[in-house]
Image: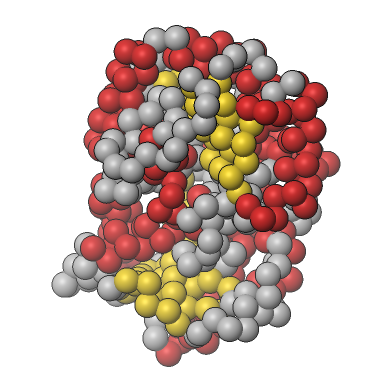
Amino acid sequence: MTATGSLTIALVSEHASPLAVLGGVDAGGQNVHVARLAGALADRGHHVTVYTRRDSPDLPDQVRLRPGVEVHHVPAGPPEQIPKDELLPHMPAFGSYLARRWQARPPELVHSHFWMSGLASLRAARELRLPLLHTYHALGTVKRRHQKYADTSPSARIVYETDVGLGCDRLIATCRDEVVELGRMGIPAHKVSVVPCGVDTDQFTLHGPVAERGPYPYRLLQLGRLVPRKGTAVSIAALARLPDTELVVVGGPAADLLDADPEVRRLRDIARSAGVADRVRFTGGVPSEEVPPLMRSADVVLCPADYEPFGIVPLEAMACGKPVVASAVGGQLDTVADPGTGRLVPPGSPEALADAVGGLLADPALRETCGAAGRRRVLSRYGWARVAAATETVYGAVLTARYAVTGVT
């Protein structure tokens, strides 16, 4: 650390702006993670600048997100929305801009998020000899394994991800499963520190407003981007085995655009075929302040993704005192304690999902016990203050190692 203990930190998040409206195809957990981490680091006395790509001509160069945190819009490619899988050609310009910007005002430490941010940051950090840490949020090897030909990532993604992992000072993985995946890529475990994602325990609470319920005795809730890998089709198929129960699906485009969305149309067809169309409700994307009331309105929160690099939704549900039924993949293996806070089930199995949910719905006392245990687990491990402190510890280790080699702070 510096003599004062305060650092100037650059967080680089090329496609996931902390200012974005959540629920879109490319706006989800990473946006929340970067925003909350930046704020929690600022609370610890650091000055944080988040660098993200300018995707609208109307955006100002800089926005003050909160005290100690600024968002800087980087001109790289046309100032318009571009799917993240099409952003790679613009990363050289992004990296060159960072190098020019940091030449004049270098941060003391750079922490990049997602592989393309790592690629851009690696170029600038090498040129200016700045310490660089990286968090992947998702790995191309895992995505390709699960999506196969449906994977739209650039073909060179895995090669570039390996370059970033080997070229940076330290990797911050969000779960133990990721360390194993990185080892398969040839990145040694001693180069990886595990720091989980966090949840705002003041926003997601046991008590507060509760969204209005439908006419059914039980409510299930699934929240996240409306993409096939999130497993909404599995939840709909499971619903056919759960009478007297409604499923509320939160996320995707705005409510008035749902009818035109291809994934919504696909899921509605599945619901009609399963005979549960009248018990499935799509809200579309909602403002962040509406999420906790929706969580509190549910009896059980579902997280049935095919794969999940980390998954913030289980933490949000647990913070609201709700039991979680999640697929036993990725970060959910760390966050959801089965049987303490919910259930872990095989991915892609409506039968297993329905069995686990049915057991919880049949036992109100068990749901309450799981919910209380989930809240305790979140408070003890996943509050943003704890996550920021753990991240700061990794930063300090990297800076100490640099100082030992160069003698320069």
Q: How is the image coloured?
A: secondary structure
For residue 389, say whether it is visible.
Answer: yes
Question: Up-down: is 381 above or below 99?
Answer: above
Q: Is residue 25 left or right of residue 31?
A: right
Percent x, y of residue 313: 47, 39
The one nearer the camera, 278 or 180, is 278
The one nearer the camera, 181 or 355, is 355
Q: Residue at x 39, y 86 (%)?
A: 105
Q: Residue at x 74, y 21 (%)?
A: 275
Percent x, y of residue 200: 32, 48
Q: Residue at x 58, y 45 (%)?
A: 283
Q: Is residue 361 left or right of residue 92?
A: left
Classify the position of the N terminus by image quarter: bottom left
Q: Residue furthest front?
A: 215
Q: How many marks?
A: 0
For residue 317, say whether it is visible.
Answer: no
The one nearer the camera, 138 or 29, is 29
Q: Residue at x 58, y 83 (%)?
A: 58
Percent x, y of residue 53: 58, 73
